[in-house]
Image (tube, rainbow, N blue to C red):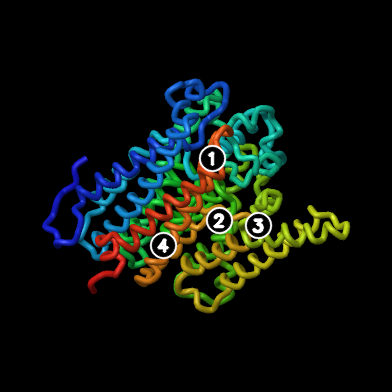
Amino acid sequence: MAVQERKLEPQRASLRSLSWQGFIASALITVASWGIGWFPRNQLSPLARSGFFIEFRTDAPGVIICIVLMAVGIVWLTRTWILARPWVQSAGEITRKELSRLLAMWSAPLMLSFPILSRDVYSYLAQGRMLHADKSPYAEGISALPGWFDGGSDGLWAQSPSPYGPFFLVLSRIIYFVSNGIPEVGVGLLRIIAVLGVWGCYHYTAKLAAKMGQSPNWANWAIVGNPLFLLTMIGGVHNDALMIAGVFSAFAYAYDRRPMAATMALAIAVSVKPIVLLVLPFIGLVLLGRTRTMRARWKIWVKVAAMSLTWLLLIGAVTNLWFGWLPAMFTAGDAAFPYAPVGLIGWSVSNLAGLSGADISLVNTIVVAIFQLLSLVIVARLALAKDASSPVRLAAWALSAVVLLAPIIQPWYILWLIALFAISHRVAWGSEKLMIHASSIILVAVFVDQLSIEQWHSAWLLKSLAGVVVLGLFAALFTADAPTKRVLRGPEA
């Protein structure tokens, strides 16, 4: 896939070079995933019986080589992303078509990888299987059906209700049925859905950025081109891209003064991940325009709430799941992740209370509920802010409060915040560098944490090796690589 060349400054990498560098980096990650990506163990899996892939995973030298290859690929892809930054510095440097080709080259090899950085895709299939068996994923965990563990799902969701909306659950059910329970087919079909979500993000990021006076190419470089985004959404087969595309399209239609389309788009996003229902008041602020009296706000909020309720009612009726997602949205404490601040606080307080004979589960639920109430108060305060000139920015802060005060924070949740903050206004160079470094740190964390190491290997030893290798490579990138340091010094202007 050739990319048009241009006369360049001496220090700027060509688009052709960046395209192939990103392609090779992703290819390394894909090959490495065959040894340390999440492997289907289902007895229906043909790959689970393949000697070729089993050798990748059972041989210690093969696993170590895969760890090194993936670390090199992740750092190289990050370097390529950073070196592409000068191309989006100003309008006319790169066309939208050239940028889309660049990102397509970076993404293409990931279509053949095993799931990396997360194994939630197997939970999607497990919840689709539950729905196909006439069980509600909102009422029971995936352990309600036998064989769930062999399907590759994380035990975190064994007893927890689904955090996903009805549209996505029905989509998972259809894919489970079409795949006939074969995990590779199911993952492949879900990956196609994930790619459509990435394309939707790319399209609506450009559209919304233009409406807000931002550079569409810069916004797509910051949001969609981010290696954390590509590796999580395509490599990890996540549904968050669908959700982000839905939210961005809702805001874009709102700026076009199309309330029906805006509320429908947000309803679809909510039907993927219900948490973005909290964006609804800010969609109303966009539709409100310049008249922002309190009476006008409540009037538009009643209007958009009624339209959104209509769309959600229609989706609930079609899927026959109705509003089961609503109580499930507030029960994430059942799957509290101790690395989230609130999850850690809830775990600590409840265990201390347990020493005196209190009900640990009840105390944890109360602690989590207090922080959830606090996050809702913050959202309400932002929606009622006197200065409502930037509703998307307010929505970014509101979602930040909800995410950071939740009992479970997955690393890819940060992508929601990066997306909303980056699209809401052109950030300062210092904030761009913060985004680059934060994305790199999260990549290190999820790479080490989400290595799939077979039981006959020493997981802690291999993960320690992975941490040393990837940290060393990132340190070299930021301190010793001259082209990267040159870009990170900031634009010449």
- Place of residue 98 in the rendered image (x, y in percent of width and height, measured from the top left): 23, 50
Q: Alpha-carbon neighbours of circle 4 within 10 Å: few (<14), some, or many (≥20)?
A: some
Residue 166 visible in the picture: yes
CA gap between label 3 and label 2 equals: 17 Å
Query: Which circle's residue, 4 or 2, is located before the other in the chain?
Result: 2
Name the residue that disc number 2 marks: 276
Q: Is residue 162 or residue 344 the one in the foreground?
A: 344
Give the amino acid type for the residue marked by disc 2 in the picture. Val
Residue sitting at x 55%, y 76%: 385
Residue bearing mark 3? 407
* Residue 119 pos. (x, y %): 54, 40
| Residue 276 position within the rendered picture, expressed as x and y whole percent measured from the top left | 55, 56
Secondary element at tag 4: helix
Q: Earlier in the sequence, mark 4 or mark 1?
A: 1
**Quarter occupied by residue 150:** top right
> What residue did someone put label 4 on?
437
Residue under numbered circle 1: 119
Q: Is residue 75 left or right of residue 133?
A: left
Relative to 171, is 41 above or below?
above
Residue at point 65% right, 57% down? 407
- Lower position in the chain sequence, tag 1 or tag 3: 1
Residue found at x 60% / y 67%: 379
